[in-house]
Image (cartoon, helix red, strand yellow):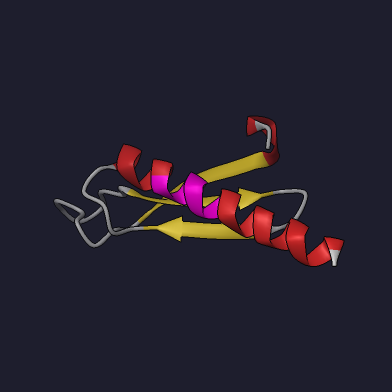
Amino acid sequence: MNEDELEINTCESLYDPYVGAHIGVEITHKPSNITVRNIDKRTQFANKVEAIEKLKFELLALNCSNSD
């Protein structure tokens, strides 16, 4: 997974400190069009790390299902 294959956007989170703060993260993997979102951490960095892990899992699951 290359960084240029990803579209990373921010979104509202459960822990936005004030209206308009977007610390949630949404990541789309352009080649597969898989989108994951993480909003439950208190920092944007933590949400990004967890969203990347979710995306890796989704891509692995897709790869495994295609190899069957």
Task: Confirm whether the magenta stretch covers residue 18.
Answer: no
Q: Which x, y percent locates residue 25?
A: 42, 50
Q: Quadrant of residue 34?
A: bottom right
Q: Would residue 65 appear left or right of 9 to someone viewing this image?
A: right
Say above or below: 42 vs 66.
above
- Which secondary structure is most common in the magenta stretch? helix
Q: Would residue 54 appear left or right of 64 to someone viewing this image?
A: left
Q: Residue farthest to the front?
A: 68
The residue nearer to you, when weighing 18 against 38, is 38
Q: Would residue 49 appear left or right of 19 to someone viewing this image?
A: right
Which residue sits at x=59%, y=59%?
35
Q: Quadrant of residue 64?
A: bottom right
Q: Which x, y percent locates residue 68?
A: 85, 67
Which residue sits at x=77%, y=49%?
31
The residue nearer to you, when weighing 28 against 19, is 28
Quarter in which the N terminus is drawn: top right
Q: Which x, y percent locates residue 32?
A: 75, 55
Q: Which residues are magenta?
A: 50-55
Say above or below: 45 vs 26.
above
Q: Which x, y percent locates residue 18?
A: 15, 53
Image label count: 0
The residue nearer to you, when weighing 68 against 38, is 68
Say above or below: 42 vs 61.
above
Which residue sits at x=70%, y=39%?
5
Q: Residue farthest to the left?
A: 17
Task: Confirm whether the magenta stretch covers residue 54.
Answer: yes
